[in-house]
Amino acid sequence: MVRVRFAPSPTGALHIGGLRTALYNYLFAKHFSGTMILRIEDTDQARLVAGAEDYILESLDWVGIKIDEGVGVGGVHSPYRQSERKHIYQTYVNQLIDSGHAYYAFDTAQELEDMRQRRKNDGHTQQHYNSATRMEMVNSFTLTEEKLKKYISENSNMVVRLKVDPDEELVIKDLIRGEIKVNTSDLDDKVLMKSDGMPTYHLANVVDDSLMQISHVIRGEEWIPSLPHHVLLYRCLGWESIMPQFAHLPLLLKPDGKGKLSKRDSEQFGFPIFPINWINEKSDEKIIGFREAGYLPEALINFIALLGWNPGTEQEIFSMQNLIKEFSLERIGKAGARFDIQKAQWFNQQYIQNINDDELEKEYLSILEKEKIECNPQKAKLIVEAMKSRITFAFELWTQGKFFFLPPREFDNKVIERKWNEGTIKVLKDFEAEIRNINPINATEAKQIFEKITQGKIKEFLQVLRTAITGKGSGPDLMLIIEILGGQEVAERIMFAINNIKRHT
Ligand code: GLU
């Protein structure tokens, strides 16, 4: 039975890498008809950010990642928020202490720093708190029984540490990376419980993965350094036989492929790396999301699915259902995946071209409403038809097609310089006179009239006519634009252009 979890810490907006982790977990679960769990890892109270949990839920919902069990849904292993599971971790900490696998330590920050300095001065490359240094520190091994009891009751700087035994070569299997080898002498006696009684990530993560019967842990490669400790914890808790399988996902790299993708890249290059807008009133932080930048959730999912995974064929367009069908951990690479925003735009364009016209129309009407532009559904339908093949984002129906509502007051200079002359003005005047009273006018009629006036040389005059009507040198089918605007409006625009452009020349 496949059971996977997405286990974010609510410390800020969910980065696109986190969303990819959620997606891969979801695809893997659904491929095997398994269960997708959402666990909120909020034990580090100092790093909690208000609103982050809601943000995660809303982001997952927007992209269509459905949670079967967890925060917001419930389930047999409730609660799924780690801060509400404190009592559970305490049981396992006690078990580890009783079995000699964990111990109390009371060192101050200064004492820890002194130890590191001493190790450095003595020429050691490592300054870990472990078998090499443990006996120099303030802990269960070095305190008398009496003092230990006193320190525990006073709870001064008390933490619980994992006792890592040295000189063992751990060989851990990762489904993406193969074997990972670590010598236990190179590991720290990791803190399992902090002085506030909260478990650290390591303990809570392992305890919950076991209790929630997680079969596969799929997460970012930044967690590989924690893996040996997790494996040791499974062993010390007697859970080796139920240990999940591990798969660590490759990094997401900057657009130039050099280094890890960061929030700063998004600010610097002006593209989103968060699924939806992130607004943190406390820090005055406001970052644009893919949703608000105009991306369709299906396009974003398709884009991030291919950042690390490949189908082994040339196929690029995948619906969520196709992804579920095709997805496998074997086809995830080890190398980092370059984040290329142009590719994301390309996906959006593909999905916009395939979207149903009615849906696009609805979206368009709602954009127009926000812009306080009145438009009847019939006109919206025609504009969508005219513009659809030219846009990447739905909002471009408005930004690239403002001329459908607002007569141009500026005209493409390049066209004017090259083509505005007595001859073209005469053609425009003749056309204006003919169509002024044809309301409505359809595209075929408009074309016939223009053909007649240009004596078949329609191509020579088309760009000037377009510029006079729309202000721009290029755009969708001009005859269709004329049909949408109507004869009188077109005539008025032509007159305005003639009267105003003349003055410039
Ligand atoms: N809470 C960790 C995070 O924020 C989870 C890591 C894991 O999946 O084990 O990413």
Image (tube, grey):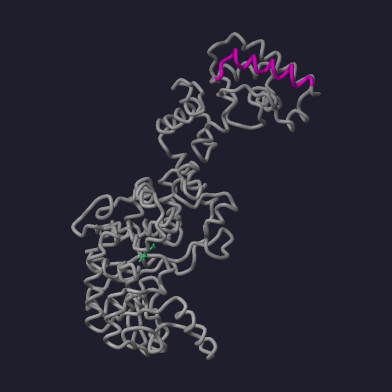
Q: Is residue 404 magenta?
A: no
Question: Viewed as shown, does residue 45 lie left or right of 267?
Answer: left
Whole-percent x, y for residue 267 in the image: 57, 52
Q: Which residue reaches farthest top?
A: 437
Observer able to see residue 315: no
Magenta-colored stretch includes residue 497:
yes
User: Is 160 positioned to the left or the right of 365 in the image?
Assistant: left
User: Residue 460's spot in the image, x, y percent?
Assistant: 71, 27
Q: Residue at x 53, y 91 (%)?
A: 122
Q: Quadrant of residue 134?
A: bottom left
The C terminus, quarter of image? top right
**Picture quarter containing residue 258?**
bottom right
- In x, y percent, where is residue 400? 58, 33
Q: Nearer the viewer, residue 33 or 131?
A: 131
Assign ligand 1 to one image quadrant. bottom left
Q: Judge from the rendering whether residue 296 lies leftward or rightward of residue 406; answer left or right.
A: left
Task: State the residue in front, 284 or 486.
Answer: 284
